[in-house]
Amino acid sequence: MTSPRTLLAGHDIRAKKQLGQNFLSDPSTAEMIVRRGNFDARDVILEIGAGLGALTVPAARAVRTVYAVETDRRLIGLLKTELRLQHLSNVTVLQENILKLDMAPIADREQRRLQVLGNLPYNISSQILVWLINARKHVDRSVLMFQSELARRIGAAPGGKDYGRISVMIQYCADVKTIAGVQSPLFFPRPQVDSEILEFRFHPKPRTAASDETFFFRLVKAAFSKRRKTLKNALAASELHLAADDARGSLQAVGIDPVRRAETLTVTEFVRLSNHLAARNTNLEIRNKS
């Protein structure tokens, strides 16, 4: 494949920083990512941020079908040309904003859950991961590239500064493992930090399930929005509109010290607190209606 630097220069295209564009420029690394992803000939891949096709080409050679999603219209023609030159006919290119894409029609058409692959735009990686969590019923597995700082946060354990909202959300519904590292010189333009490839295997059902998942995610967001505060004070100051006494009482009811901070809670403790508060809210609504 033609290098990204040469291809972009030949068409007078510059990478857009606002789109988080760092193109993988080493074909052997792309092939390694697909190989370690353990894709097979029955798989259907949804690729996020296809760019110039660095991952699209080896993925298409390994699986049944690839849906290559790219938001930058300047790259669509180059991507399609590359696919023709590689004699690949099993790729459907979609010019879409991934955050607005509905995966359901693709999964329904293919009659199977999808594999998701991508070198994620660094500036919206967290948003894409939240989108993926919400759409996970259509996803079997994901193999995604993140800049190292976010990769550490995703896999972080409770108790440290890296552990936060995104850690809890993804660990609630998936097993995460690192399958490779990719050094920054292998991209164009070169980013300031290295990247990591993470594999996510989504649980058919969370091991400890929230009774109201939407509320659970709101609770996690609220707890970490004021992460320097105690849980009691963070929840009382949040969009959940809990009085301080109610926050204290709910935390104590599920065995959590109100002076702890969000970063010390395990996923299971967040679920217990969420289920208690959701049941409490339901009971309050019932009493108010009666």
Image (cartoon, rainbow, N blue to C red):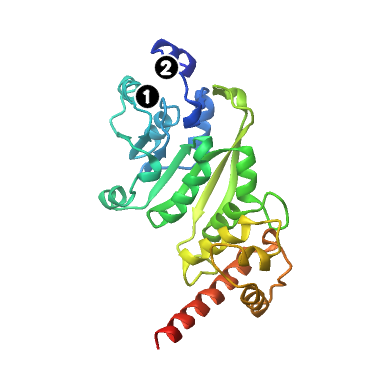
User: Looking at the picture, does residue 256 appear above or below residue 79?
Assistant: below
Q: Earlier in the sequence, mark 1 or mark 2?
A: 2
Q: Position of residue 44 (x, y in %)?
A: 35, 44
Looking at this view, is 6 or 204 the one in front?
Answer: 6
Q: Are marks 1 and 2 in contact (CB under 8 Å)?
A: yes
From the image, which quarter does the C terminus lie in? bottom left
Q: Residue furthest top?
A: 10
Outermost residue, bottom side: 290
Residue shown at 60% from the left, 73% from the top:
243
Instruction: Name the spot of residue 82 as percent of width and height, x first.
Output: 35, 21
What x and y, as percent, mark residue 130?
A: 48, 51
Look at the image and tell me whether residue 193 can be seen. Answer: yes
Q: Is residue 9 left or right of residue 94?
A: right
Q: Which residue is mark 2?
A: 13
Q: CA distance from mark 1 to mark 2?
A: 9 Å
Corner quadrant of residue 258: bottom right
Q: Is residue 7 above or below residue 234?
A: above
The residue positioned farthest toward the left in the image shown? 109
Nearest to viewer (mark 1 / mark 2): 2
Given residues 41 and 79, the one toward you in this image is 79
| Res. 43 in view | no
**Residue 69 located left or right of residue 181:** left
Please state which of residues 113 and 128 is positioned toward the viewer in this rendering.
128
